[in-house]
Amino acid sequence: MTKEKILVIGASGQIGVELTLALREIYGNNNVVASDLREENPLLKGSGPYVSLDVMNKEMLHVQVIRQNVTQIYLLAAILSATGEKNPGLAWHLNMQGLLNVLDIAREEHISKVYWPSSIAVFGPTSPKQNCPQQTIIEPTTVYGISKYAGEFWCNYYNMKYGVDVRSIRYPGLISYKSAPGGGTTDYAVEIFHDALEEKKYTSFLSKDTYLPMMYMPDAIRATVELMEAPADRISIRTSYNVAGISFSPKEIGAEIKKHIPEFEMTYEPDYRQEIANSWPESIDDTVARNDWGWKHEYSLATMTEDMLKNLQEAEV
Ligand code: NAD
Ligand code: AKB
């Protein structure tokens, strides 16, 4: 068996930190190289190698891939939905060119596997709101969603045309306590926990009945690892897999938090992110991922809320 050497690009971000730590557990600390444009996240410090890297600099990326004998690349660097609407040109440029740089190098250097996440943001107002299927009408209205949908087809193209083993998941909004989210529409579902503990109140930037597909980070990390470890002949989707976790509204998560913090109060001041949220489905059908590689989420709204509060409280003391 070839010894795997993994490069994680965007390792200091919300997913990158936890995914890097999980991959280091599996493949060994020194076999997972974390990289990012910004400085190394404190949670990664001392746990394995780190290089400063800009995914837009193809030459620099290529040199690192050769120098580190990289066999697998996980590309997490991107601009998310809310930040993307503020700077559409930059979001398109990073989300597209970063992916094309990685796919090209993967092809040239015979990288054994590439991971690149898509998002439920590929879906638009004309997609089904409930249990949105794997294959359906997909007409995204955010630059982030457009870039993710185009990216899915680039992944499919590099797989079909050049045999690059690239795999992808359309993550829902991710909720985590280790690292902060980076400019998404679903970020309220992380902020709410911090404000509930610190201020006993939270003002939501989405209206109270806005349901969105969400997932607790441990489920998202497990989904990623399970997809990447699945035998290639189990992967029927080379664009990106729907995976489902939990769906809830600001009002529902507020009520769940209130069970633990009775004095917690919520108010609502929807802003520009409401329109983005309104364009997305409320829940996702992940039958194809379940059938292909056995995906099943574990955390419910109640178990996720309990775990988030417990871990954030422990981090405070
Ligand atoms: P994040 O913003 O928290 O992290 C992205 C990281 O990429 C940051 O640390 C940033 O410094 C780095 N980066 C930015 N530009 C770079 C560049 N040019 N070169 C190298 N690094 C660069 O994002 P995240 O939430 O961890 O998301 C990771 C991936 O997962 C993205 O593709 C995102 O679209 C996707 N995703 C995330 C969610 C979610 O809820 N977090 C949901 C769906 C999909
Ligand atoms: C965002 O809100 O932009 C992300 C996502 C669902 O892709 N969390």
Image (cartoon, grey):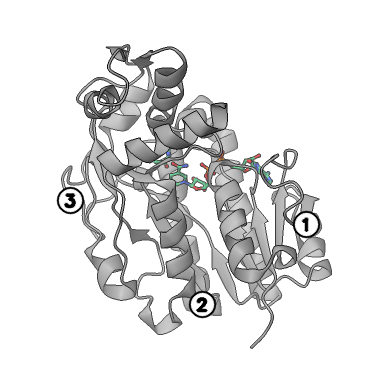
Where residue 131 is drawn, which disc sits there?
A: 3
Callout 1 environment at 10 Å: few (<14), some (14 to 19), or many (20+)?
A: some
Which disc number belongs to residue 49? 1
Q: Could you tell me how far apart the alpha carbons at marks 3 and 2 are, in whole angstroms?
A: 32 Å
Locate residue 314 relative to residue 300 in the image: left or right. right
The kind of secondary structure element at disc 1 is loop
Q: Quadrant of the C terminus?
A: top right
* Nearest to viewer (mark 1 / mark 2): 1
Q: Is residue 169 placed above or below 40 in the rendered structure?
A: below
Of residue 292 and residue 314, the one placed in the foreground of this image is 314
Q: Residue at x 38, y 19 (%)?
A: 272
Q: Is residue 197 visible?
A: yes
Of the two numbered discs 1 and 3 in the rendering, the one whose residue sits closer to the viewer: 1
Which sits earlier in the primary sequence, circle 1 or circle 2? 1
Residue 223 screen position, x and y as percent? 41, 61
Q: Secondary structure at mark 3?
A: loop
The tag on residue 161 is 2
Nearest to N terminus: mark 1 or mark 3: 1
Question: Tag 2's secondary structure?
Answer: helix
Residue at point 69% right, 74% down?
108
CA distance separating discs 1 and 2: 33 Å
Distance of label 1 from label 3 (alpha carbons)? 41 Å
Tell me the kind of residue under disc 1: Pro
- Name the residue rendered at 46%, 40% in the picture: 176
